[in-house]
Image (spheres, rainbow, N blue to C red):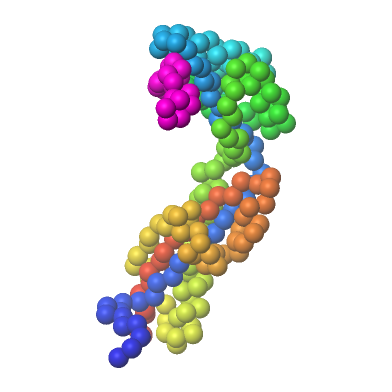
């Protein structure tokens, strides 16, 4: 016998996915202060000085100290050149941190000022929303609605009556975005997910329903 054999039939399974879009009200800038010096002590001291200068630049823009969060501090040997021409150049100290601002119109000036202060490496600029937990909750509710509608359609097409929910499984929408594309509720599918100027919060779920027997 060819085809798919369902060894343990038990009901109806349906996937649902949904996205909620929101205008960002928060920006997060990832920057690094990097210094290379002859000794570890000098490298740490130079980097610390650069970090203090960046913090002063941030304060000058009216942002509180809590807007700056250290994320990584590292020290390693630094070499110039390759192969036989490789030469020891000293010790490289890196201090990476994130700066958050609710003023999106301030981003350009923030970048200019922190680079001028010594953060010569800008890793990324990300936009976010403060209300992400609420948006995620809404996306999850919409995903459940989408899965229920799909399961109801399958049941009607098969001529059976949909029973109670017997299984709920949270699905990572980022990891399975491509696999489950098209399973959503229409609240954020397709190319509009990547529309500039919006933050997209997604959710996905797998629901299992019993089949009601009258």
Residue 108 x %, y %? 71, 29
Answer whether residue 75 is magenta in the image. Answer: yes
Q: Residue 7 versus residue 51: which sits nearer the camera?
A: 51
Q: Residue 210 versus residue 174: which sits nearer the camera?
A: 174
In the rendered image, the quadrant that contains the C terminus is: bottom left
In the rendered image, the quadrant that contains the N terminus is: bottom left
Residue shown at 72% from the left, 31% from the top:
105
Above or below, 63 relative to 207? above
Above or below, 165 relative to 119? below
**Left or right: 182 as drawn, with respect to 22:** left
Most distant residue in the bottom direction: 1
* Span colored in magenta: 70-92
**Left or right: 148 as drawn, with respect to 8:** right
Most distant residue in the left direction: 7
Magenta highlight: main SS: strand
Residue 47 x %, y %? 50, 14
Above or below, 157 relative to 143? below
Within the image, what quadrant is residue 7 found in?
bottom left
Within the image, what quadrant is residue 4 found in?
bottom left
Residue 155 x %, y %? 45, 81
Residue 100 x %, y %? 58, 28
Residue shown at 66% from the left, 18% from the top:
116
Q: Residue 135 versus residue 203: which sits nearer the camera?
A: 203
Within the image, what quadrant is residue 132 found in?
top right
């Amino acid at each position: 016998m060819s085809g798919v054999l369902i060894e343990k039939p038990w009901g109806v399974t349906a996937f649902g996915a949904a996205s909620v879009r929101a205008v960002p009200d928060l920006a997060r800038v990832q920057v690094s202060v990097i210094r290379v010096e002859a000794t570890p002590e000098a490298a740490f001291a130079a980097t610390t000085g650069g970090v203090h200068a960046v913090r002063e630049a941030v304060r000058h823009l009216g942002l509180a100290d809590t807007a700056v969060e250290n994320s990584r501090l590292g020290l390693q040997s630094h070499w110039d050149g390759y192969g036989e021409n490789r030469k020891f150049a000293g010790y490289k100290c890196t201090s990476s941190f994130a700066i958050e601002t609710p003023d999106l119109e301030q981003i350009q000036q923030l970048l200019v000022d922190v680079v001028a202060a010594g953060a010569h490496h800008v890793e990324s600029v990300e936009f976010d929303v403060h209300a992400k937990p609420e948006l995620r909750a809404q996306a999850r509710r919409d995903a459940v609605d989408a899965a229920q509608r799909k399961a109801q359609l399958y049941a009607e097409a098969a001529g059976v009556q949909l029973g109670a929910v017997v299984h709920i499984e949270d699905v990572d929408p980022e990891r399975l975005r491509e696999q489950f594309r098209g399973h959503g509720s229409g609240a954020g599918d397709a190319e509009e997910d990547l529309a500039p100027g919006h933050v997209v919060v997604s959710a996905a779920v797998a629901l299992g329903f019993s089949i009601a027997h009258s």
